[in-house]
Structures are given as structure tokens and as C-alpha cells.
Image (spheres, rainbow, N blue to C red):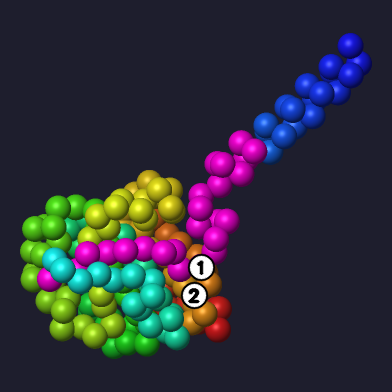
Amino acid sequence: MRLLTVILACFFCSFVSAQKDSMDAPFRKHPFIPPFDLLKTDSSSHITKESINTKHKTLLMFFSPECTHCQHQTEDMLAAIDSLKDIQIVMATYQPFEEMVAFNQKYSIEKYSNIKLGRDTKYFLPPYFRMKSLPFLALYDKKGNYITSYEGNQKVAKLLKDFDSKN
């Protein structure tokens, strides 16, 4: 009876610790730029972790083209694009391809050399970060290490301060 109690206690402890691990978002276990694959607006080429310049700070923004908060965040960033020129911005959406293309045209994203826009066709990023609201912003340093993330709009000055705090 005592042996059975010890075995059950060990099983329970391992089950509880396994549950905690499975509840952590993947980005907490792997705090660096995730291995994403985004379909670009040309519908034939892709943006991947390997195709971005990892020698720059990176802002990964997950958004929906129809989301007004996402539109405001984009407008704020474009208004301050000079202060973001040394930051690589990767914008990803899961919404239909046509909506992404319309968003790209509305904001002329292609004219900004430090912004890349693509569709997360595999729906990889939302579960990776366990997103609950948009826009979602994840910040990474020049080495690709995670700094912090936000759900909802953030002032550009706050983002720059977070990037500067991790030199």
C-alpha cells in the first residue's frame, strides 16, 4: 500500500510539471525570432527567418488589415519611420490574401525598405505567441533574442525605448 502511494505521488508530480510546461507559450521556451514562413504580396515568394537581416533589431507585428487598432499602429509607425529606419519590421497577417494586398496598397508598404509584409498561411504565429488581441508586437535585439511583446497599440517612443534598453 505504501509503495502504491509513493508511485501515485510520483506520477502526480510528473503530471503536474508536464502540464505547466505544456501551458507555456512556445516563444517562452525558445526566446528568439521564430521560424516563420510568410507569403509575400507577389503570391510567389516568401519571407522567412532566414531571409530577414538578423544583424538588425526586429519588430514582428501580427495584424489584421480590417482591425482599426492595427491600422492606427501602422499609421503611427509610418509617421515615425525615420526613427525606425534601423529596425527591421516584419508585418504578418492571417487574413485573406486580397485584404493583405489592399492593406499594402493603402499604406504603400513596399516603398519602405525596412518593412516586409506577408501572410501567415500556416497560421503559425498566433499559437506560437498565444495571442489574444491585435495588433501583436514582438521585439527582438540584433542577435535575434526576444526582448518583449505587447498586445494592443504601443507608442513608437515606447518601442524605441524597449529596443534601446537591450543593446
Q: Is residue 62 above or below residue 116?
A: above
Quadrant position of residue 44: bottom left
Is residue 41 visible to us here? Answer: no
- Residue 33 belongs to the span the image colors magenta: yes
Residue 46 coordinates in the image, percent (x, y): 25, 70
Q: Residue at x 37, y 55 (%)?
A: 125
Q: Residue furthest top?
A: 1
Q: Is residue 12 above or below residue 101?
A: above
Mark 2 highlights which residue?
144
Q: Residue furthest right?
A: 2
Q: Residue at x 35, y 78 (%)?
A: 52
Residue 16 coordinates in the image, percent (x, y): 68, 33
Q: Residue at x 45, y 68 (%)?
A: 33
Quarter that holds the N terminus: top right
**Camera-nearest residue between 147 and 14:** 14
**Disc 2, SS:** loop
**Camera-nearest residue between 114 and 1:** 1
Q: Are marks 1 and 2 in contact (CB under 8 Å)?
A: yes
Report the label total.
Answer: 2
Query: How far is disc 1 from disc 2 in space, using C-alphas?
Result: 5 Å
Residue 6 coordinates in the image, percent (x, y): 86, 23
- Left or right for 9, reference 19: right
Range of the magenta residues?
18-42
- Left or right for 147, reference 35: right
Identity of the amino acid at label 2? Gly
Residue 9 coordinates in the image, percent (x, y): 80, 25
**Disc 1, SS:** loop
- Left or right for 18, reference 164: right
Q: Residues within 10 Å of mark 1 (few under 14, many from 20)?
A: some
- Residue 81 belongs to the span the image colors magenta: no
Q: Which mark is residue 32?
A: 1
